[in-house]
Amino acid sequence: MKVLQVIDQAYRTTTEEQDDTILWLTQSMRGAGGDLMVLLSGHGVHYAISRERQPALTLGTWRQTQPAELPRDIANLVESGVPVYAIQDDLEERGLGGLALQNGVRPVARRAVAELYEQADQVWHW
Amino acid sequence: MSDTKTLTFAFMEPPFESERTVTFFRLLDAALDRGAGVRVFAYEGAVALAFARQQPHGNAVHHRDSEEEDHPLTKDWIAALQEKARSKGIGFEWINCGLCVDERGVNDVIEGCGRGGPPDLWRYASEAHNTLTIGTR
Amino acid sequence: MSHYLFIQSQDPFTETRTHHQFDLIGQLHDAGHKVAVLLVQNGVTPARRGAKSDLFDDLLRWGVTVRADQFALAQREIDHADLKDQVGVADMDLVIDAMLAGHKVIWH
């Protein structure tokens, strides 16, 4: 069973969970043998061009010591054999079209997303 | 029962915050009506749905005491679906993502709800006839 | 040919992504797949007769099968007669039947 994980949002959990919760879920399921693909869409395309560690939050005397490392998480997914796609049109909408994608992230035109949906047995939209 | 199909649902919303929670439970109920076995992987905020220490309360604005208000609690919804499944002789399983439970401190869950992790979602999905995931906004 | 059921909770009045979601639905439909949409929650709002949403009306014009959740309609006091032509009414069993039939069921 091949599953396409569609990540259409970004930064919801990255501070509190110190990762993107669906990238993390995907990596965990991959570790359990899952056959997965990832489609970054909407604001999720920010992860495709991310280069830096997330800023550490400070509140009162509390300071975050392990902010999320999104580039690492994307790289780990790609290295583990999970194809990661980013919708080119969503990148361009957000002024990100001229930036280099992280190694291994594949751009896909919005008009080609339907083909990705067809490649998967199931589509899990988060 | 050998030809009972099982459906897996993954869900992320906590109780009391979103219409999605109601739609999700209606889907589980409908699945049981159709004779399908149900497996739930509760992720992130959804792990609070099974918290055993949810408590009803009265409502002064409604002019109702606790008994009159009869406030819905998701733990009761889960229990009712468990009962429905039992009466129909079909399966109803519920796993909370354990790390999500720990960070929220909702370790005290109702009977019949267990603890697991992402490999369980993959297992549930692999063994099910079909899977629906409902994220959060 | 594949079968898709989109459970559409997002609505075009408040969620910009709906535009692209509806486009994708249209693409799959145009590619010859069997595509249906169940409107739930605020997703039913553009289905009311008189609601102004070209995006939603395009779905109907393209011939995509669109139904609205009975419960969501009742919450919003939308009677069947208040719906735009071509919008049917359904309940959650539509989703379950699609899942049991092995369709790709996707939540928007």
Image (tube, helix red, strand yellow):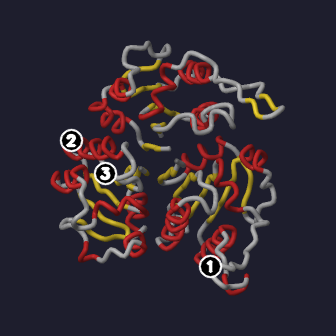
The local secondary structure at tag 1 comes to helix
Q: Is residue C45 above or below residue A12?
A: below
Residue A68: quarter of image? top right
Tell me the residue at 48%/37% (across/down).
A7
Query: Do the residues at pointers 3 and 2 share their chain?
Result: yes
For residue C3, the mark is 3
Tell me which amino acid carries mark 2: Ala
> Distance from label 3 to label 2 (Cα)?
12 Å
Q: Chain of mark 3?
A: C
Q: Pointer 3 and pointer 2: residues touching (CB < 8 Å)?
A: no
x, y percentage for residue B110?
Answer: 76, 65
Residue at figure coordinates x 47%, y 25% from the top left: A83
Q: Counting other residues with Cα less than 10 Å from the Cα at mark 3, is it few (<14), some (14-19), or many (20 or more)?
A: some
Q: Position of residue A88 (x, y in %)?
A: 35, 24
Residue at (58, 19) in percent of width and height: A71
From the viewer's perspective, is residue B9 above or below residue A123? below
Label 3 to label 1: alpha-carbon separation:
33 Å
